Image (tube, grey):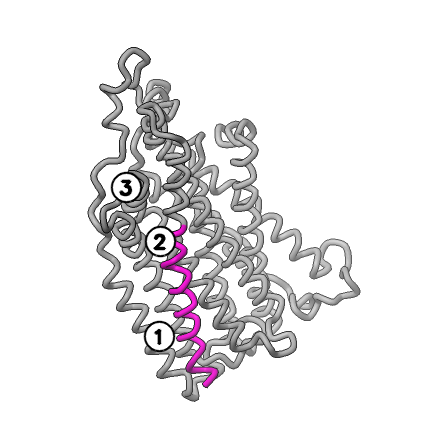
């Protein structure tokens, strides 16, 4: 009940992010139900049904990642020093955030169920002259237990991941500004709000590079083999070699692991060769935020490179992608991009104290804006060519 009350009183942007989580959950739930419908309508093709279900876990993982990012930026569940006095400590706020995430995802699952039943004709007859009857196996019964289990996957996974991600958040003040800053002598209390010494560099860069190289090597080795049809995508991509798909998976995991290290190196490069105040500030902040934005940025890089490689392979053919493949691609691309933007918003919220301290010391606002632009440009100059390179290397064995 408290989660619902907080949702009603939230800022419109917060509500919009929760609605986006619900929409993503609805999309994943619809894909899961489609896989169940295929299994019910084709009992002799159990292997294909299992593979379709396994492919649904890719958008499921992207949706869970997005739900966790939204939960981290929810201001109503941030630990504050004053809330502990009324019994809302960090543990209860973590539970509250998990419940709020579960409520949003459950709403999406209900929408997915209603849409699925409507398109199957189970509610009010077949719509669209029965165009979706074959795709959704409208003539096959659905086991109720399987429907409930599949629809519960997204809420349970997102709530659990949110609880694990938020269990060790630091306690902040209610205003977001250091409580020691006063009006009489602000300079004495400001050094603690200025950018601290850079954090230790992330340790996942070597492992990420190794996994990315291994994924590209597996794809190049298996691209010309005869392992076609072993791991088909739901739709018309049923001739993709299983080794290529396994290579893409390793590449995506490697880029996600290497992302924080690459972002940290971008911060180091900004401070190289006699940096000025703006470059020093931009590099220091980027190094401290490398772990927060580097992972989502690496995932976006992996998704974009996979989309570019898939388009290079199949984009020129007439209607190469089926409707379920297109829905899954939209979910993965949208959720990963939204996760990156949400993580950037969280980093901006945590920089509020530093920005206010610098402005109090007399730093011009234009310098802060220039530092932000420098950070974005540095990340773009590193990750954009990397995305293009990975896409070219991924598509090269299959287009040669």
Report the side of 102 relative to 168 (left or right): right
Q: Residues within 10 Å of mark 2 (few under 14, many from 20)?
A: many
* Residue at left offset 26%, top offset 60%: 205
Spot occupied by residue 246 in the image (x, y as percentages of width and height): 39, 73
Provide the secondary structure element on which disc 3 rests.
Answer: loop
Spot occupied by residue 29 in the image (x, y as percentages of width and height): 55, 55
Q: Which residue is mark 1?
A: 216
Evaluate whether residue 124 shows in this view: yes
Q: Which residue is mark 3?
A: 276
Q: Quadrant of residue 245?
A: bottom left
Q: Nearer the viewer, residue 242 or 207?
A: 207
Q: CA distance from mark 2 to mark 1?
A: 20 Å
Q: Main secondary structure of the magenta part?
A: helix
Q: Which residue is mark 2?
A: 295
Q: CA distance from mark 3 to mark 1?
A: 40 Å
Looking at the image, residue 323 lies above or below residue 367: below
Q: Name the front one of labels 3 and 1.
A: 3
Q: Nearer the viewer, residue 170 or 159?
A: 170
* Residue at left offset 59%, top offset 72%: 321
* Residue at left offset 44%, top offset 66%: 305
Query: Magenta residues, as a range?
Result: 377-400
């Amino acid at each position: 009940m408290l989660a619902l009350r907080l949702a009603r009183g939230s800022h419109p942007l917060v509500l919009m992010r929760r609605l986006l989580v619900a929409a993503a959950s609805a999309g994943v739930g619809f894909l899961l139900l489609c896989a169940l419908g295929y299994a019910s309508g084709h009992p002799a093709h159990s292997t294909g049904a299992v593979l379709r279900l396994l492919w649904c876990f890719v958008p499921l993982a992207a949706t869970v990642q997005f739900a966790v990012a939204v939960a981290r930026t929810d201001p109503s569940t941030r630990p504050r020093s004053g809330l502990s006095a009324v019994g809302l400590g960090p543990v209860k706020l973590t539970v509250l955030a998990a419940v709020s995430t579960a409520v949003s995802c459950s709403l999406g699952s209900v929408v997915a169920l209603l849409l699925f039943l409507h398109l199957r004709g189970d509610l009010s007859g077949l719509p669209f002259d029965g165009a979706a009857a074959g795709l959704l196996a409208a003539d096959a019964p659905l086991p109720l237990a399987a429907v409930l289990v599949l629809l519960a996957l997204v809420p349970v996974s997102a709530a659990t991941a949110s609880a694990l991600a938020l269990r060790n958040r630091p306690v902040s003040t209610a205003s977001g500004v250091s409580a020691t800053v006063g009006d009489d002598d602000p300079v004495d209390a400001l050094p603690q709000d200025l950018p601290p010494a850079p954090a230790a560099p992330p340790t996942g860069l070597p492992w990420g590079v190794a996994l990315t190289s291994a994924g590209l090597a597996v794809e190049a080795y298996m691209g010309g083999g005869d392992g076609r049809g072993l791991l088909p995508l739901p739709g018309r991509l049923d001739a993709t070699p299983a080794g290529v798909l396994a290579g893409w998976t390793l590449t995506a995991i490697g880029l996600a692991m290497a992302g924080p290290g690459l972002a940290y190196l971008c911060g180091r490069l900004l401070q190289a060769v006699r940096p000025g105040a703006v470059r020093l500030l931009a590099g220091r902040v980027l190094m401290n935020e490398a772990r927060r934005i580097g992972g989502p940025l690496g995932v976006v890089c992996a998704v974009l490179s996979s989309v570019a490689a898939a388009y290079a392979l199949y984009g020129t053919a007439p209607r190469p992608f089926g409707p379920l493949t297109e829905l899954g691609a939209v979910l993965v691309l949208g959720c990963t991009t939204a996760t990156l933007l949400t993580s950037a918003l969280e980093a901006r919220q945590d920089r509020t104290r530093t920005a206010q301290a610098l402005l109090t010391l007399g730093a011009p606002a234009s310098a802060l804006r220039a530092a932000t632009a420098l950070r974005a440009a540095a990340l773009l100059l590193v990750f954009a060519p990397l995305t293009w390179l990975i896409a070219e290397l991924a598509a090269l064995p299959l287009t040669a």
